């Protein structure tokens, strides 16, 4: 079992982006050099960590890890703790945490951050010991909450994404935009985008185009429909856009593809 190495506490306090960032509504992109754990005090704004995005709410914990790229769309006010840890059991636990953790026991987290703020500036050894105990409690709670979140999300998201995929296949000629499908799933567009990509390994646009192309290929082979009719039937905005997407993905035009298939059947 790996050794439990206590983190080096770099900073603890309350951060108010509106005071720290003048005349801007978005902070600059920066690369983190340590663990940054934040408890928002208000809702509003957005947090960006690498390719993940989350609406800022007062019932989430933000966990940024060393080496990640992050910025924030204001407003944003939070409790924060910055700490350095490079190995050991606690390091592994923190690295495995999701960037955004939904919590159902906010008061417990608020009390921990208040205690950390209260004793951060003191030089007394007993107070430093208390801070380390609070950090251990914080990491323990984060691991518990993230495990519960992962279990709940895996089940509910899997069921919802399967339902959305079925809807896409049955309504391929309809409006299948991010906003439309997010509303169908009762998710925010950002959350839906993240869930869909995690579940399928593809963006919504990539998946929808793939499904539309599959149906188009079937119609090219098995019907006498014109390219314009196929484009409409498969949900493409125009024949020219359909042909462009088809050639980009298949490396051949729709007409040339249909001729090649016809030749194979004639042999």
Image: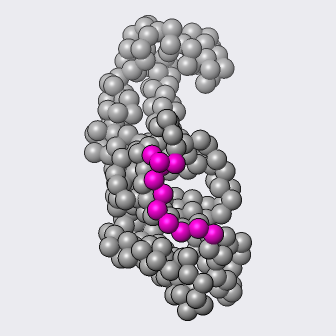
Residue 150, percent from left and from top: 44, 65
Front one among 199 and 127? 127
Pick the residue in front: 152 or 229.
152
Q: Say whether residue 119 is visible.
A: yes
16 part of magenta stretch: yes
- Image quadrant containing the N terminus: bottom right
User: Is the stretch drawn in magenta largely helix, strand or loop?
Assistant: strand
The image shows residue 259, relative to residue 127, as above or below, that is above
* Direction bottom: furthest residue: 126
Q: Position of residue 260 (x, y in %)?
A: 63, 15
Relative to 129, does residue 249 appear above or below in the rendering? above
Number of disc labels: 0
User: What residue is shown at x 40% (from left), y 66% (from top)?
Assistant: 149
Q: Is residue 91 visible?
A: no
Q: Is residue 83 left or right of residue 79?
A: right
Residue pictured at 56% horizontal, 19% vertical: 246
Q: Is residue 95 magenta?
A: no
Look at 39% across and 20% down and name the residue there.
Answer: 235
Q: Residue at x 50, y 80 (%)?
A: 119
Where is residue 132? Give x, y as percent.
Answer: 56, 83
Compared with residue 226, is residue 39 higher up or lower down, i.e. above or below? below
Which quadrant would residue 164 be assigned to in this image? top left
- Determine whether, in the image, residue 110 is placed left or right of residue 128: left
Image quarter in which the C terminus is found: top right
Task: Give percent across and percent down for residue 69.
Answer: 63, 49
Question: Would residue 184 be found to the left or right of residue 23 on screen?
Answer: left
Specify start and end residues of the magenta stretch as a single range. 10-20
Q: Quadrant of residue 173?
A: top left
Along the viewing direction, whichever of 181 and 226 lies nearer the viewer: 181
Q: Is residue 187 above or below residue 234?
A: below
């Amino acid at each position: 079992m790996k050794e439990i190495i206590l983190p080096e506490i770099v900073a603890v306090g309350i951060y108010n982006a509106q005071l720290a960032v003048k005349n801007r509504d978005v902070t600059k992109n920066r690369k983190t050099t340590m663990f940054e754990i934040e408890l928002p005090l208000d809702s509003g704004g957005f947090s960006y960590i690498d390719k993940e995005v989350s609406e800022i709410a007062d019932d989430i914990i933000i966990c940024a890890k060393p080496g990640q790229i992050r910025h924030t769309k204001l407003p944003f006010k939070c409790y924060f703790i910055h700490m350095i840890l490079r190995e050991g059991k606690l390091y592994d636990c923190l690295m495995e945490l999701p960037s955004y953790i939904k919590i159902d026991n906010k008061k417990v987290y608020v009390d921990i951050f208040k205690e950390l703020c209260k004793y951060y500036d003191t030089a007394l050894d007993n107070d430093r010991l208390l801070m380390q105990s609070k950090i251990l409690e914080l990491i323990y709670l984060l691991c518990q909450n993230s495990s519960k979140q992962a279990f709940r999300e895996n089940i509910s998201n899997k069921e919802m994404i399967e339902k959305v995929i079925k809807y896409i296949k049955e309504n391929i000629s309809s409006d299948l935009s991010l906003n439309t499908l997010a509303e169908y799933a009762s998710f925010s567009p950002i959350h839906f985008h993240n869930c869909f990509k995690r579940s399928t390994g593809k963006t919504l646009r990539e998946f929808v185009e793939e499904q539309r192309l599959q149906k188009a290929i079937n119609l090219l082979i098995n019907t006498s429909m014109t390219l314009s009719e196929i484009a409409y039937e498969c949900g493409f905005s125009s024949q020219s856009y359909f042909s462009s997407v088809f050639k980009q993905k298949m490396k051949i035009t729709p007409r040339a593809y249909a001729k090649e298939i016809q030749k194979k059947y004639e042999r």
